[in-house]
Image (spheres, rainbow, N blue to C red):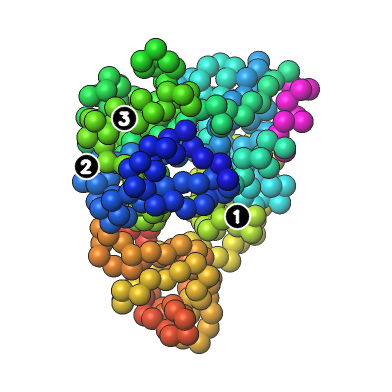
Amino acid sequence: MRATPLADRHRAAGARFTEFAGWQLPLQFAGIVAEHGAVRERCGVFDVSHMGRLRLVGPRAAELLARWLSRRVRDQAPGRVRYALALAEDGTILDDLLAARLGDYEFLLVVNAVNREALLARWQPQTAPASAVLGDETLATAMLAVQGPRAAAVLAAIGIALSALPRFGCRLLRWQGGELLVSRTGYTGEDGAELICAAEAAGALWDALLAAGAQPCGLGARDTLRLEAGLPLYGHELSRAVYPGEVGLDWAVDGDDEACGVAAARAAGRAGLHRRLVGLIARSRRVPRPGYAVLRGERRIGAISSGSFSPTLGQAIAMALIDADCATPGSEVSIDIRGEPEPAELVALPFYRRS
């Protein structure tokens, strides 16, 4: 079980821990609802150091990424970040990730913890022929996510200005003598930034953010926030059994046909995909859990991929992959919750959008 560089601080703050992808991570501090509200109304900070951080360097780095990812990267300007997919040969999803271009010949990829080692094993053998190096910086660095309507003010208070950084922009800064990568990205549906620093600098950065007004948050609130924002999670909405078009990510497949899986994903879309990702709002407060069947009458039309109680809406919500011919917003369905059908309404995603 791996621990992040901030584990001692989390323990001292009374965090409850959970295991995720081989890491011991804080599930909650003050409580999921309180932390969720802090991010929606003020500012929260998450320790997301478990996320994989892979640095690709070399004169043909963009050419390599163009073969690995579903997005165009050759025209990506330095200082910009793109959401992308890594696809299998059959067009299904190996991972979703962020690709930040740091320079003409340098990229940083932030990948899901559960897929980091598999992606390294898949990609590293291809780097030597291209005179490139793919390094794993996950254990040598830390990553914090500062999110919420006051995130920019909190960051400004510790000397990090977001005002000149566009959404999906990134830049390298010096902070207390060390290198800090700031990207205006996040996984909550709110404004904010993700910060990557050396592991030994993480404690000082965490302390400064808390002193400036950020509230510590755990994985529990991260999950309810991303669900409200309709953001997919690998292993739930995304997997080797899912095509991008089924979950509304066909826009993220704009790369060359020569890129791994891109032609297959496009062909699957042209052939007609039979499932769609939808949102559901339950009529009762009973929470739909992953794997629960979604029914139309007696017909099983799909299954819940993620579900929780929404603190913002005050209702039980879920996402589900269901038969495409049943995926009309406003339709009434039921969810089989432990043998009892609970009525629900299909709705367009996301459930919550920042004004």
In the picture of the structure, the residue carrying the numbered disc 3 is 207
- Checking the image for residue 239, the label placed there is 1
> Residue 113 appears at what percent x and percent y?
56, 43
> Residue 339 appears at what percent x and percent y?
47, 85
Q: Residue at x 38, y 64 (%)?
A: 308
> Residue 78 appears at what percent x and percent y?
48, 20
Look at the picture and state if 304 lies above or below 51: below
Sequence-wise, the earlier of marks 3 and 2 is: 2
Q: Residue at x 66, y 15 (%)?
A: 59
Looking at the rendered structure, the secondary structure element under dot 3 is helix
Looking at the rendered structure, the secondary structure element under dot 1 is loop
Q: Amino acid at mark 2?
A: Arg
- Checking the image for residue 42, the label placed there is 2
Looking at the rendered structure, the secondary structure element under dot 2 is loop
Residue that lies at the very extreme toward the top in this rendered image: 177
Q: Amino acid at mark 3?
A: Asp
Q: Amino acid at mark 1?
A: Ser
Numbered disc in front, either 3 or 1:
3
Q: Residue at x 28, y 51 (%)?
A: 30
First to last magenta residue range: 122-130
Q: Residue at x 38, y 81 (%)?
A: 342
- Can you see residue 221? yes
